[in-house]
Amino acid sequence: MMQETTDRGACAEFAHVPLSSADRQVIFDAVADFGPQMSALARRIWAAPELAFHEVRTSADMCAVLEAEGFDVTRGVAGLPTAFVATRGSGPAIGLLAEMDALPGFSQDAAPRRSPIPGQDTGHACGHHLFGSAAIGAGVALAQWLDQTGTPGQVRVYGTPAEEGGAGKVYMARAGLFDDLALALHWHPDDHNRVWQSASLASIGARVMFHGRTSHAAQAPHEGRSALHGVEAFHHMAALMREVVPQGTYIHYVMRQGGLAPNVIPDLAESHVGIRHPDPRVAQEVFDRLARAAEGAALGTGTRAEVTRTGGVYPILPNDMVGRVMLANMALAPAIEWDEADRAYAAEMQQSMDAPPPLDGIDRLGPYNFGTQGAFSTDVGDVSWLVPCGALGTVTWVPGTRPHTWQAVAAGATPIADKGMVLAAQGLAATAANFLAAPELLARARTELEAARGPGFTYRPLLGDAPPPIPA
Ligand SMILES: [Zn+2]
């Protein structure tokens, strides 16, 4: 049994009622039985890593596995060719999120040392091949348990593309695909086991193009209107604004274009801005002020500003009820067990790390930090404002591994990853079953969500009406 390091009393309340330990064991066993198929799927996706919005083979493979397990699959939802929704059963709907995209610049084989694969430029450096595969494994086990017990419930696996910079879930949220869910669960590959209910930051991104008039910088400077001046004035105003915005606001900017030669007054210049704040309403207000600053900069420099929103995500709204039920089920899940080969692999990989943590923590569950403010943004945020949402992480990487590293790619195709993926699917499926067996817990989670959102909440995506940036 897994050791839990904190908060045992808090989770004991949900650990035994109303999901019996026999039922929980049925689910754990069903996930373990499906383990080889999960691993095979993850290994296929790992071997052919596809970038955000390009997950064509990955999505098709995931859909085929789900259809073979009796799910009805709708492909190409929300205008995203690689997004899908797979459903099985009927009753209160449980959403399992399945990310799938890889990252550029991460060619690496499964060796515990730096070892790029010749001719390959992408890699699963964030473990999303495991992410989607475990969601499917959890969905299959949960659906089997619902059938066996006659418990009402619908399993819905959401294939959510382009987490890495594309925010696929936001387009799916905007299309209303999460609106009728009772609960949404997800996880992430990690170097330790945990249930996380920390908050993230709302984020809005925009491109600001300044249009001026070109002229010879010496012969006829008065005929020119410098687009670069527009960007410079705009960035100065943005920098000043940092003093007079609500605490916790981040304003980021870069210049992407500013002219080509100093003897030509540039007619085109481009700024990219990012705004973040823990509260999506504040992020929106600051964005509106920044858009007016762009107009002011254009007015003062005789140029024209064109503001185009390029992205926007809500912060994660943590849900303590979901977190505690998840914690209880994770604490009861079978602990990860490494064999000698796993330990040898990990020990060798840790030689590439500075001060790696000890390996003896892989069977423990880390502290539960409800509501801790994180300095990151994710497209899960939008989902968490629409439906009670919970997340866990498991050891799929060698302790000391950070996401977006070659070490994450390498371990992603080893038994270490397979074992962590099984634990993740067990935690997700048992948590979902726990809620379906006790609809009153679902109601409490929903009440908590509504209180946290505040009265009169209406979901308005921070993305605005921007279309998905589907590559040609
Ligand atoms: Zn990730």
Image (spheres, rainbow, N blue to C red):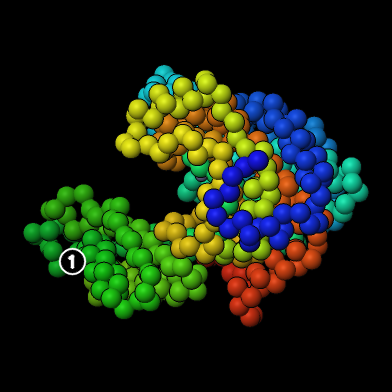
For mark 1, does the 10 Å Cα neighbourhood hold few (<14), some (14 to 19), or many (20 or more) residues?
Answer: few
Q: Position of residue 80 (x, y in %)?
A: 62, 47
Can residue 332 be spotted in the picture? Answer: yes
Q: Position of residue 297 (x, y in %)?
A: 28, 72
Q: Is residue 349 above or below residue 275?
A: above
Q: Is residue 321 left or right of residue 469?
A: right
The image shows a total of numbered marks equal to: 1
Can residue 436 be spotted in the picture? Answer: no
The one of 298 and 339 positioned closer to us in this rendering: 339
Quarter of the view holding residue 35: top right
**Which residue is found at the position 35% from the left and 27% from the top?**
351
Q: Is residue 72 above or below residue 173?
A: above
Q: Secondary structure at mark 1?
A: helix
Quarter holding the N terminus is top right
**Which residue is found at the position 9% from the left and 60% from the top?**
219
Q: Position of residue 416 (x, y in %)?
A: 55, 29
Q: Is mark 1 within 8 Å of ligand 1?
A: no
Q: Position of residue 231 (x, y in %)?
A: 27, 63
The one of 137 and 53 positioned closer to us in this rendering: 137
Q: Is residue 17 left or right of residue 223?
A: right
**Which residue is found at the position 33% from the left and 74% from the top?**
293
Which residue of the protein is positioned furthest toward the right in this rendering?
150
Amino acid type shown at disc 1: Glu
Quarter of the view holding residue 451: bottom right
Q: Is residue 214 above or below residue 76?
A: below
The one of 279 and 196 positioned closer to us in this rendering: 196
Disc 1 marks which residue?
223
The one of 445 and 107 positioned closer to us in this rendering: 445
**Which residue is found at the position 41% from the left and 31% from the top?**
406
